[in-house]
Structure formats: structure tokens, C-alpha cells
Image: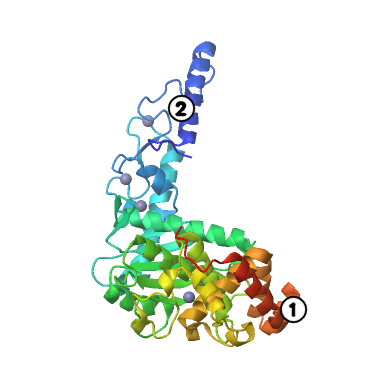
Amino acid sequence: MADRIGRSSSQRWAGALAAIFALVGLAVAGPAQSVPATTCRTCGNHGVLDCSKHKKGWLEIERAVAFCSVAESCKSCLGALCLDCKQCTNESAEGEMQKRVQLVKSWRESLRTTIDAHSRGEPLLHVQTAHIDLGFAIPKIAVDKDKLDSHEGMHLYGDRIEALRALYLQTLELDEKDFSTRLRIYMCRDSKQANELGPRVTGLGGNFAVGTKLMGIDAVYCMWQEPRGLPDDEALHRNIVHNVVHLLTSNMDPAGYFGNPANGWVDEGLAHWFEDKIGGKCTNYCFEEVLTQQGQTFKGGRWRPAVRQMLDTGAVQSLAALAQKNTDQLTYPEHAQSFAMVDYLMVVYGGRQLRDFVRELKRKTPMRDAMQAVYGTTPLSFDTEFQAWVKANYSPLDSQR
Ligand SMILES: [Zn+2]
Ligand SMILES: [Zn+2]
Ligand SMILES: [Zn+2]
Ligand SMILES: [Zn+2]
């Protein structure tokens, strides 16, 4: 851990030990040749100093990620975040620093050919965190009262996506060995950049309205902040949550996309469930004809009252009927019902059973058999139980949170 001025605890310890050794050195005067008799006042015998060219508090933020292209562009430290102390010599610290500079350099170089070469104009910024490679070019973001620039926005989204991944693992009781790949996410400046880079990173062709993703063994999402559908940071965040959940669900062992054929209700329902949990409503849909749907929402994205009203007017479908549909065939009300069915399974039975159910479906077990194996029920009984639960738990009136 680093303190506010970015000095690491190991640096503080080194300083403290050096001070102790200096005292001992005085006391035993002479034989302790290997211990420096004097402390370097500049660096406390650490051999390196914090780079002073980063904004207040930012050494800590940069040290919390593996690599950042903005840190790499620092002309003083080249991304090492520290500088050699000219007042003393410490070969091991200097060697570590040089190693770090080389590592940062080769990370940045490889992105120039794999990503930057395919996104004309100003290159994306990049950050690598524990589980995510994020390319970022969204110019500015307003979060509450703060106005963030691109660099700040990128670190915020890096943290948010890591937090979402951690929540997903915790909710569905999964661990690292259930995932075989890193998440690669590109949040582009505009439609042009996204449509140029998207096919390169996903291998999928065609123009898209907001984003395109590659799911299964690979987990890649490339998008831009389409202003009508994603007018603010909250909408952008929900979009990322929805789509990253698709990536995680697909990559989760056994890796593979399972929303087509059928199973759309589980695939979309899960993505909506996390969208609601983190963003308080559901505003993202995976339609094929997504271009014509921009900026529209169903019941303001507040789906609990919507589903209760559907139930009261006899508009809720049977599971057997809904479970015929692929992800991209669901209508707005079917998206809402899918969310509610996943909400029911999550609240009443918990994440571990939902995980097992998803696993069965990914193994191509017929839905009816998967439901029997995991929940010990039939689609018909599910309908009765689900509808009774909605009646007891969802109000037809929207009580805004
Ligand atoms: Zn020094
Ligand atoms: Zn950075
Ligand atoms: Zn620097
Ligand atoms: Zn979706």
C-alpha cells in the first residue's frame, strides 16, 4: 500500500531500517562494513524517488493498476513512476526500475499494432488492471458534480468493471478457475472509431449502433457512447454492466455463448439483473435491429411494477413459451419478464443454483431437464410459483428509489 504522497510502506521500512542501522553503526563503530554508515537524505537509501510529474494522489492510482498509457507517456519516468536518486547508488532498485520501464514500453508497443493502428485519429488511452484490458477514448464524463477527463474516466471504468466482475463471481459463487480469458473492452470516441475498431477486435463484420461483442472463449466488447441511448454517465455505466455480464456469462465454464438457440430469457435476464442491481433500472437490450431502437426504453426501465401490471392484465407468458426465444428475438415486455424470472430465481433460490442452471443450459441440457435437476420443478409449476411470487413481492405502483 502507498500513503497519500505515494511513498510505499517498503520505502518507509527501508528508511526506518537504515536509521536503525545507522544508530547500530555508531554504537559498534567499525566492523559492520556492509551496512551503509550514512543514510542518503534524498531517498532514505531506497535508491529511487517518486516521480513528481504526476498529479496529487495519482502515483497511488497508477500503482493500483498493472499498466496505464498515460503514466507511460510521462517523459520523466517513462511509466516507472519513480526516478533514480542521483545522490546514491542502489543497483537492485535501479535494476528494478529499468526492468519496469522495459515492461511498460513493450506493453505499450504491442497495443500500437493491435489496437491503435485500427482506430484512426487520436489513439485510445489504455489501462491494464488485474482482469481487464480497457481501451478508452470517451472525452469527458460528468459523475455527480465531478467532471472527469479521459484519463480519469478510464481509471474509473477500470475500477467499475473490476468491481462488477468481483460482484458477479461473488453472486454466482464462481472463482478464477471458472474463467479462461481476460475481458477486453474498448470504449471509443465516436461511431466511426468504434465501427473501425470493432470488427478488428471482435472479428465480426457489419455496422452497429452502439456496440459489438465477441463472446465465449474470447470476451471482447467494443462500443461508443451513442448520445440518444447513452446520454449520461449512468446510462453509459449500465450499458457496460449489461454487456460485461454477457461476456462473463459466456466465458464462464463451460465457455460458450448460450443465448441462441433459445435461453434468451436467462441470458438477457442475468444481464438485466446486474444492470438493475448496480444502476437501478434496465435500459439495454440486445436486439439485432438495435439501430432502430436507440433512445427507447420500456416503462422507464423500472421493470418490477411493469411486470406486476403485466401479470394483473394477463400479459405474462408461460416459461415454456418464453424459453423458445433467442436473446435477439425478445420483445420489450419479454425482456422485462426475463428480468423478473431471473430476479425470482436469484432471490428465492440464490446465485449458486442459478449458476448451476446456466451451466446445464450451456451443456445443452434441455431447459425442462435443467429445471428439474437444479430446482426440482417443472416449467408449469415454475409459472405458478413465479406468478405468486410476483404478486407478493412486486407492487404495481412504481416507488422510485
Ligand atoms: Zn539516494
Ligand atoms: Zn493512468
Ligand atoms: Zn512520471
Ligand atoms: Zn443483452
Q: Is residue 140 above or below residue 94?
A: below
Disc 1, disc 2: CB below 8 Å?
no
| Residue 55 seen from this side | yes
Q: Amino acid at mark 1?
A: Gln
* Residue 169 in which image quadrant: bottom right
Secondary structure of the residue carrying numbered label 1: helix
Seen from the viewer's position, the closer of residues 286 and 375 is: 375
Mark 2 crowdedness (10 Å alpha carbons): few <14, some 14-19, many ≥20: some
Q: Is residue 249 above or below residue 277?
A: below
| Residue 217 seen from this side | no
Q: Which numbered disc, 1 or 2, marks the residue that appears first in the sequence?
A: 2
Q: Is residue 388 above or below residue 322?
A: above
Count of numbered badges drawn on the protein: 2
- Residue placed under numbered mark 1 in the picture: 372
* Residue 263 located left or right of residue 42: right
Which disc number belongs to residue 15?
A: 2
> Measuring 49% from the left and 58% from the top, which residue is drawn there?
162
Q: Amino acid at mark 2?
A: Gly
Rendered location of residue 153, percent (x, y) = 34, 56
Residue extending farthest to the left is 121
Rendered location of residue 301, percent (x, y) = 44, 70
Disc 2 CB within 8 Å of nearest ligand 1 atom = no
* Residue 251 located left or right of residue 96: right
What is the spatial separation of the Cα atoms under label 1 and label 2, in whole angstroms?
Answer: 64 Å
* Residue 349 located left or right of residue 202: right
Seen from the viewer's position, the closer of residues 214 and 230 is: 230
> Measuring 28% from the left and 65% from the top, which residue is drawn there?
123
Rendered location of residue 66, percent (x, y) = 45, 53
Rendered location of residue 136, percent (x, y) = 34, 63
Secondary structure of the residue carrying numbered label 2: helix
Which disc number belongs to residue 380?
A: none
* Disc number lying in front (1 or 2): 1
